[in-house]
Image: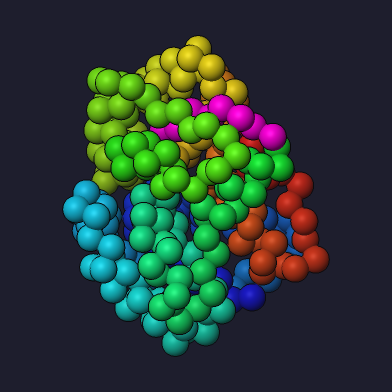
Amino acid sequence: MHIGLIGGIGPAATDFYYRRLIIAFAARKASLDLTIVHADTPTLLAHLGANNVKAQVAIYERVTNRLAAAGAECVVVTSIAGHFCIDAFKPVSALKVIDMLEEVRSIIAAEGLRRIGILGTRTVMETRFYGGITTAEIMPPEGQALDDVHQAYIAMAASGSITEAQRATFISAGKHLIKAGAEAVMLGGTDLALAFPGGIAPFPLVDCAAIHVDAIVSAAIPLHSPHAPGRT
């Protein structure tokens, strides 16, 4: 299957998907057929903040048409923040959409998790992963911690790099969520791979981007069943 990625939202997230797909296909001795188009992080974040679904969907439609013209057979939004309009995008997409929210929901239900902390943008945290998880309670940070995580995440995503202060913010918030009763912490922002490289953290993780990539590999190589569902 020729995979189409909507990248750039943000740069580190695109790099995560690209590298992980290369490794997965090489491990299976399969040929990776991939095209990446660029969407703009500040534009996405502005539309997310204003809940401007129509404008972001129009961007996705435009770049997906480019992917279709290049021969892609599916499209992937490489951003959890970018999934705020996924339900509106799927019916108008020229290509099949591999939806991260659906894939993460399935894994959480299968693993039987009941209380999960979440880190990411304000919208992702406050909407508790866009209300996409029905089998578990999603716990965002509270008060100033939520603001701190949001600001650290936005700065990290825009720059494509992370500072030690930003990393400390995410780790502190995650530890507090575990102390409050969460069984694991959901990485509700794709760029959080920068904060927890290799899925290494001082608490259990639900790595949404890793789950998403596993689903892409399964779709592209139908006989493959993922060995690791993205939980570390």
Residue sitting at 37 percent across and 24 percent down? 141
Q: Is residue 93 left or right of residue 212?
A: left
In this picture, residue 27 sits left or right of residue 3: right
Residue drawn at 50 percent across, 12 percent down: 179
Q: Going 45% across and 75% down the picture, which residue do you hit? A: 91
Q: Position of residue 34 (x, y in %)?
A: 54, 71
Q: Which percent across, then down, holds residue 190?
A: 44, 45
Most foreground residue, 20 or 93:
93
Please state the horizontal and vertical placement of residue 135, each as a whole percent of the image. Answer: 60, 39
In the picture, measured across the screen, residue 206 lies left or right of residue 187, that is right
Q: Is residue 142 above or below residue 61?
A: above
Which residue shows up at 52% across the image and 55% down it?
100
Magenta highlight: main SS: strand
Q: Would you place residue 111 above or below residue 55 in this image?
A: above
Q: Residue placed farthest to the bottom in the image?
A: 69
* Boundaries of the magenta span: 112-119
Q: Nearer the viewer, residue 147 or 29?
A: 147
